[in-house]
Amino acid sequence: MFKKFFLKICGLTLAICFVVIGLNVNFSDIFSLPTNSIVSYNDIETINDNKIFGKYVNAELADIKVGNDKTSYGKLWLKLFGFLPLKQINVEVTKGEDVFVGGIPLGFSIKTKGLLIVGSNTVLSNSGGVETIKSIELKEGDIILQINGVDIVDYEQIPEILNQNEGKRSKLSILRNGEIFTCDIVPEKDLQSGDYKIGLWVKDNASGIGTLTFVKKSNNRFGALGHPITDFETGVEIPVQEGNIYRCSLVGINKAEKNNPGELRCIFLQGVNNKGEIEKNTKFGVYGTVTELENIVDYNLTAEIGSRMTVKTGKASIVSSVSGVREEYSIEIIKTSYQPESDDKSFVFRVTDKRLLSLTGGILQGMSGSPILQNGKLIGAVTHVFVSDPTKGYGIYADWMVQQ
C-alpha cells in the first residue's frame, strides 16, 4: 500500500517537474540555434542575466582557444540547471564591436557594374525596322558586363565598341541571377545617327532613400537599409561599380494605412553633402565607408552589436528621425527566428509607441535600415513592413549585417 502511494507521489512530482520545466525553458528556440555563431563575452552575460532561453538555462564557455587579440574560439554550452547539457554551439568569441547608432535618412547613388537592360526597341536601318535581339534570349533585368571582351562602364561605350568592330557580330557577356553567360548579337546601323546599335534600352545608375543603421567606431565602415537597392522597373539587385551616400532632407511624410504603405519624402542632390562611398549592395543592405561623420552620427549615441542569440521577444526600441530629430520609439518584438542561415526577415516586431503611430501610422518606406535596440545593444534593423498591417514589420539581425 505504501509502495503504491510512494510511486504515485513520485509520478505526480515528476509530472509537475516536467510541466514547470516546459513552461520555463524555451526548448524550441534552443534546438533551432545554429551550430556555429559569433558572440561576445557581454552577449553571454546578457543570455544568463536576462534568462533568454528560460529560467533554468545557463550559457557556459568551454575549450577556449585564442585566435588573435580580438577573437577567440570555443564551444558554448546551454545547460539545464547548470549541469544537464542541452545544446553545444561552436562560437567565435569577440570582445564586442562598438558602433555609432544610425537612424537618419540617407540618399544613395550607385553607378552600376555594367549596364542594366530595361527594355528593347527596333533599329531603323536601310532594311527597315530591325529587332536585333529577336534571335537571342536577353530579357529585362539582365546586366551587360562586357562587349567583345571590353568591360562596360557606361552606355556611351556601346556605339564606340560597335563602330570600331564595323558592325560585325559581337559577343556580349551577361549577368543574370548571379550567373554569367555569353551570347552573340549582330548590330544594325542606325540611319539617323550613323552608329551601330543593338536595340536595347539600358541604364547605368540607380538611386534611392533609406536609413543608416550603424557606423563602426573603429574604421567608419557603415551598414544601411537592411535589404538591397533594386531597380524600380525590373526589381533586380544593382551590382556596384561605385557609389556615394548623401545627407538628405526630410520634406514630408505620407502616413501608412492598411494595404497602403506610406513613405518618407526626402530629397538630396547628387554631388552635394556627399558623406561617404558605397562599396557593396547586398541582400542584407548597402555597405561602404563614411568619409565625413559630421551630421551623420551622434557621438553620444553608441552601442555594442548584440548577437542574435541575445534577442528575445518583448520590449525594444527603434531609432528614427521621422520627427526631424533622431529619437527612440518603443516597439515589441513578437517573434524571433534563430536562423542557421542569414535572412533579411529574422524577427517580427510591432510598433507600440503612440507618438510614432500618430506621426507615421507605423513603418514607412524609407525607414528600412532603422536601428533596433534591446538591452542597450544594437540587435537589428528594420527591413520590411506588413502591407496589411503597417504597425508590424520584419527586422534583420545586426550580426548578419556586420558579417557583410
Image: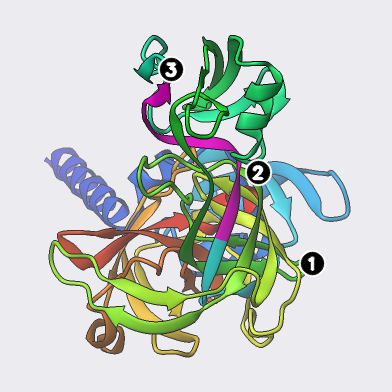
Range covered by the magenta-colored residues: 109-126
Residue at the image point whose x is 27% and y is 86% from the top: 359
| Residue 268 point in image, percent of width and height | 52, 74
Q: Residue flagged by tag 1: what amino acid is it?
A: Ser
Q: Quadrant of residue 378?
A: bottom right
Residue 392, placed above or below residue 124? below
- Label 3, label 1: how many angstroms apart (C-alpha)? 62 Å
Prevailing secondary structure class for the magenta stretch in the rendered image: strand
Identify residue for label 1: 218
Mark 1 and mark 2 lie on one chain; the one further toward the N terminus is: 2
Q: Give 266 or 31, whichever is nearer the viewer.
A: 266
Residue at the image point whose x is 29% and y is 89% from the top: 355
Query: Circle 2 — which element?
Result: strand
Number of the label disc, if any, that sits on residue 91 = 2
Q: Give 277 or 138, whichever is nearer the viewer.
A: 138
Residue 192, placed above or below residue 267? above
